[in-house]
């Protein structure tokens, strides 16, 4: 029996995952979606610190990284409205990382990478995913629509880029980091997210002005693609092809949400500073 194509596995995964996510957004109470975001943060942190703290590095570094990510996610969800809490997270992690690194210094040649990862990783993985749950809870009754908008920016950019790249791709986008990505694919991804922005303004969130929606789509889509490349840079620098095997057809969780980490942050900041009701 022939092995299913990667695209077929991706489609099958989406068929299972999308209805479950929509049910958590629109049927379950807000804390139900937070539990998903929290679990995803833990899984993403496990993959992240497996890359930055590979064997034979002391296991305590990976454990501390995941624990700090869990603490950050909980703090942002339950106390994120207090600016003092957020400032404490940023300052506390920056100060604590070198101190925690002393608990398991391991190979001194890679100690700087591991220490920086402890200070950066919990914020990079834990905050953006939790912000999706915060939008759902605090931007009722349309918070779920903004979450769908952010997810669409990330995943349609990837999907549009995949098909445009296969059909028209000739010029490499950033060959050093991601040899298969092309300029044509990137442009196709931006077209896809722009159309999603139009859909978001016209049908999903009528209170979102169309110029805002298109501008938000292009900014979030472009930076989401950069986030994808950034995660690829991290993987290549650590000699890893996929961050994990958690998501069938997609590799690890970070491979699936690398762009979402950026688009969720962009959409949340838009609702915070400009609008969102």
Image (cartoon, helix red, strand yellow):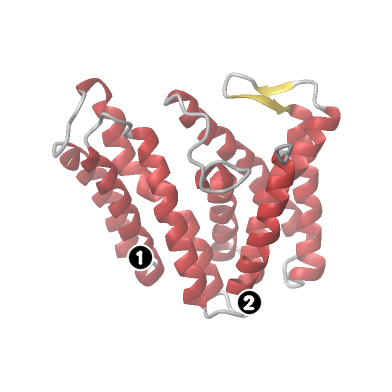
**Residue drawn 80% across and 44% down?**
191
Q: Secondary structure at mark 1?
A: helix
Image x and y of residue 275, in percent: 62, 67
**Residue drawn 58% across and 38% down?**
228
| As drawn, 69 above or below 181 | below
Q: Which residue is mark 2?
A: 26
Mark 2 nearby-residue class (10 Å; few <14, some 14–19, many ≥20): some
Image x and y of residue 164, in percent: 81, 36
Res. 134 in view: no
Residue 86 location, quadrant: bottom left
In the rendered image, the residue lying farthest to the front is 1
Q: Secondary structure at mark 2?
A: helix
Image x and y of residue 190, in percent: 75, 42
Image x and y of residue 150, in percent: 63, 57
**Residue drawn 58% across and 50% down?**
260
| As drawn, 19 above or below 5 | below
Tell me if 17 is positioned left or right of 11 in this view: left
Q: Quadrant of the N terminus?
A: top right
| As drawn, 52 above or below 273 | above
Q: Which residue is mark 1?
A: 74
């Amino acid at each position: 029996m022939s092995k299913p194509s990667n695209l077929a596995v991706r489609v099958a995964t989406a068929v299972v995952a999308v209805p479950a996510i929509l049910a958590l957004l629109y049927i379950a109470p807000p804390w139900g979606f937070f539990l998903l975001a929290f679990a995803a943060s833990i899984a993403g942190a496990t993959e992240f610190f497996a890359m930055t703290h590979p064997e034979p590095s002391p296991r305590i570094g990976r454990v501390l990284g995941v624990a700090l990510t869990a603490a950050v996610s909980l703090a942002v969800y339950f106390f994120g409205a207090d600016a003092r809490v957020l400032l404490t997270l940023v300052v506390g992690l920056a100060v604590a990382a070198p101190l925690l690194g002393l608990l398991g210094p391991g190979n001194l040649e890679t100690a700087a990478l591991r220490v920086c990862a402890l200070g950066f990783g919990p914020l990079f993985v834990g905050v953006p995913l939790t912000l999706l749950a915060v939008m759902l809870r605090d931007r009722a009754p349309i918070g779920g629509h903004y979450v769908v908008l952010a997810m669409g920016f990330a995943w349609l950019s990837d999907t549009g880029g995949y098909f445009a790249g296969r059909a028209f791709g000739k010029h490499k986008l950033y060959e050093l980091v991601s040899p298969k990505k092309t300029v044509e694919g990137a442009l196709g991804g931006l077209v896809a997210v722009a159309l999603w922005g139009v859909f978001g303004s016209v049908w999903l969130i009528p209170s979102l002005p169309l110029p805002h929606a298109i501008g938000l789509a292009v900014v979030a889509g472009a930076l989401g693609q950069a986030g994808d490349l950034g995660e690829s840079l991290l993987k290549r620098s650590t000699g890893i092809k996929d961050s994990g095997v958690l998501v069938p057809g997609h590799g690890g969780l970070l491979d699936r949400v690398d762009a979402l980490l950026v688009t969720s942050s962009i959409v949340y900041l838009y609702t915070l500073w400009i609008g969102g009701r």
